Image: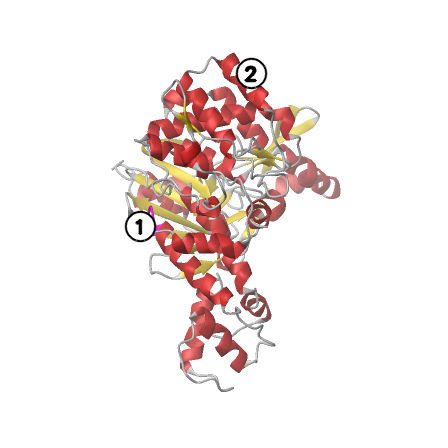
Amino acid sequence: MKKITAGIALILLIISSSGCNNSDDKTSASGRKVAVRDTSITRNNASNPHFLDSAKLESFIAEQALNDSLADGMRSFYNNRNFQFAWIGNDGLTEQALLFKSMYDFGNDSSTARKKLDKQLDALTTETALRPATHLKTELMLTWRFVQYTDHVFKTEEERNKVLETFVPRKRMPVQEIAVSVSDEKEMPTAAFSKLAEQIRRYSDIVAKGGWKNVAAVNDIPGIKKRLAVSGEYTGKDSSAEMNTALQQAIMHFQTNHGFNPTGKINDEQLKEMNIPAEKRLETLLINLERTRWMPEHAKGRSVLVNIPEFRLHAWNEKDTAFTMNVVVGKEANGTLLFASTLNNVVFSPYWNVPRSIVKNELLPAMEKNKDYLKEKNMEITGEENGLPVIRQLPGEGNALGKVKFLFPNAFNIYFHDSPEKHLFNKEDRAYSHGCIRLADPAKMARFCLEGMNEWDDQKINTAMNSGEEKYIKMKRPVQVQIAYYTAWVDEKGMLNFRNDIYGHDAESARHLFL
């Protein structure tokens, strides 16, 4: 069982000063302390605007015949929140629900697995507008799972109670107030969490001192020097209008750590990034600190993480980096979803079974304009389903999946694959796919996946990729996969990175965290 890596600290810094006094908790017949209801949470400051009736919780506990300890855990969870919803909002599942689902799937405890709930969560993952009250049972089932999970993972009652109180945001607060609570925290759970918290302290200080001034133009050399001096990239003493080596290095540092190619010259897009206010950067750091607390530990063996805003895949052997590579992810309208799974199959020279949405919205209009479209694209119709032709693209040159794909079970038909559009991997912004994840070096991924299967050497992999005949290979050693969304993090070199909020998740989180 994997621990929630940010869990040991046990203090959700965002709400640690929000007014629930645990000294007033009551010990129930189960021996578990039940938190006193936190009535300081109101509709004006709650993270989630929707509340449930406490009687509904009691009815659920009775219907499910929960034991006293689980029942009291659920009561504490909702008392701490003044009975506001935790997992479901107007826009579907909250980010914490997605993060918990991903973390849970990454280290699944079979004793708490409920397949029906998993299917309901998968269905809600793609919902963007719903009424939480209509999904009350799903909300309560997920809380039941969360209580069971924390009981399984954390050793002491104090730890478990703190997690139930603090892991899901419940009260919105001013940005600087949250940042100060981070600065006051003494115990940090992991190196990644600690490094991000250190940057929060630094940026909180920058904001307190007035932040930085906007740079007027790309040729405003004094302005660029002052701006990069505040954030720490520029350490030179020269504040003149002369470009110097120190400034050029500072600019390249800024470009690299914001996802740009390091040219040493600022363009208009980078100037826009440079002029994002310090307080907004502080918000981004706090949002990503929240995400970091749900990050699973490295799996035993091999694992892969795709960070969508970074457009990068990271592969590990245990805790050691095996490699990284560029990826292409879903464009905004077809955003790649966040989840965890296990990669267990490699498919060489794959067919591409074209999704119905693409058949309807792209292929049929193209076929109307060009009767030879399917032949030119090496596609064929294999049947009909609900009034639409079933179309697939044959293996070979030009196949949309390239020469190999990598499968990990999920409800969203997302997988890794090769791509014939190699030029996209050199772009800075690589959100172009329909939702699947394209790999810059699929042969390297194939070697990684088939490691330990001695018959699959480089030559055999290359032959299979170019055979033109589809071939499924079951991996002997599956690889844990996590699809994640971090717009701020400290890398292995100790450098703070920022990336664009390409799917708007940061903006949504900010509405639930900050006043």
Q: Is residue 480 magenta?
A: no
> According to the image, label 2 marks what residue?
59
What is the CA distance from the residue labelled 2 to the residue labelled 1?
49 Å
Q: Residue furthest front?
A: 24
Stretch of the chain drawn in magenta: 188-192
Query: Residue 290: x, y in percent?
Result: 46, 46
Q: Amino acid at mark 1?
A: Thr
**Which residue is more in the foreground, 17 or 318?**
17
> According to the image, label 1 marks what residue?
321
Q: Main secondary structure of the magenta part?
A: loop
Query: Residue 150: x, y in percent?
Result: 38, 30
Confirm whether residue 347 shows in the render.
no
Callout 2: helix, strand or loop? helix
Q: Amino acid at mark 2?
A: Ser
Query: In the picture shown, does residue 166 fall above or below 61?
Result: below
Q: Determine which of the numbered discs, if any, sits on residue 23 in the image.
A: none
